[in-house]
Image (spheres, rainbow, N blue to C red):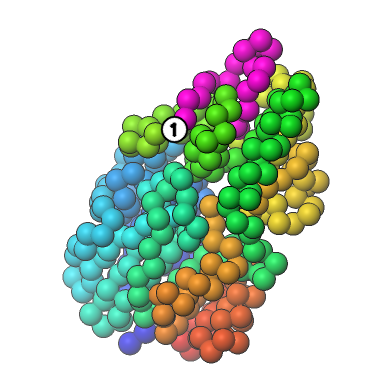
Amino acid sequence: MPWEIRQHKHGIHLPQIDWWLDAHKPVPRSFVSHAHFDHLAAHNEILCTPATARLARARMRGRRIEHLLPFGRTEQFTADSSITLHPAGHIHGSAQCLIDHAQHGTLLYTGDFKLRPGRSAEPCAAPHADTLIMETTFGKPRYVFPPAEKILADIIAFCRDTLASGATPVLYGYSLGKSQEILSCLAEAQLPVMLHEKTARMTRVYESLGITFPPHAPFDPDPRALAGHVVICPPQWENSAFLKKIPARRTAMISGWAVDRSTPYRMRCDTAFPLSDHADYNDLLRFVELVRPRLVYTTHGHTAEFARTLRDRGIEAWPLDKNTQLDLSLG
């Protein structure tokens, strides 16, 4: 008997066990794969890793029932199912959930993930499952990232060239996850780093979880203190109050979307580097090969395109959105 999987505007629901997956509006109970805001809401009850719970508490007020499950431990989930969490490699604590049901078989939900080893996240796992629900943010063939070593070398060269010109390099990365990855990547370059307040706050939570980083300081707009530093901050508008404190600057977006040449224009920055915390197109294909599912549902990003690619390769796959309810009912 196949799993029943319902895509709603505020998340994915599994009615056979009455749990949600990464619902971004309040629901009675939801698995939370990681602590980014688009995967969080004020649920009554959540299941996640201990690290995700710690990060979520730092970002969201209120109390909730928390079921904390470390990686690799299998526990009873419902009367007829068990659950195991596996690392997703997206940010620290990010998890995939593998649900084993007596009647419906195994279902793996990835949340956001990446196969490329990160410097501030656990290595991604790829457990076998009968049914796979996977994110496909970069599910088109053009989204293939260069080797991470090359991207890192380019970022370091940008920082050094900018500092040599007397300006301040400003690297844009989301305050949770991406900024800590950037900070970790700069360790070998031995470049002095300052962090935006939001970035510094999330970095302190990481440190409380046992993650170590190279030396860094809170942002100080005083020109004498700022000189010679790289600044890591969340993406900013060109005329933001924060950027106005750095009059001589060169800005760079750190994102997988940097594969698109239009990214510097869209993000109003000087340049962009394709260092991502998501899997690229080749790793999406590789992940499916590793999991060996009989049925794949795609969610987020280029869902229809990637599902079609899998069908062309002989794998039954359908996008999980409201336009494919007929396909889902026939699954």
As drawn, is 240 to the left or to the right of 280? right
> Which residue does the numbered mark 1 point to in the structure image?
213
Q: In this view, does 295 lie above or below 205?
A: below
Residues drawn in magenta: 213-233
Q: Residue shown at 35%/63% (left/top)? A: 97
Q: Residue shown at 41%/80% (left/top)? A: 292
222 vs 227, nearest the viewer: 227
Provide residue 138's location: percent of width, then percent of height: 61, 63
As drawn, is 265 to the left or to the right of 324? right
The answer to whether residue 31 of the structure is visible from this angle is yes
Helix, strand or loop at mark 1 = loop
Q: Is residue 323 above or below residue 301?
A: below
Q: Which amino acid does label 1 sit on?
A: Phe
10 Å crowding of disc 1: few (<14), some (14-19), many (20+): some
Q: In which quarter of the image is the N terminus?
A: bottom left
The picture quadrant where one finds residue 234 is: top right
Q: In this view, does 281 lie above or below 153?
A: below
Whether residue 104 appears in magenta in the rendering, the answer is no
The picture quadrant where one finds residue 17 is: bottom left
Q: Residue shown at 76%/39% (left/top)? A: 269
186 vs 267, nearest the viewer: 186
Provide residue 281's location: percent of width, then percent of height: 60, 68
As drawn, is 321 to the left or to the right of 272? left
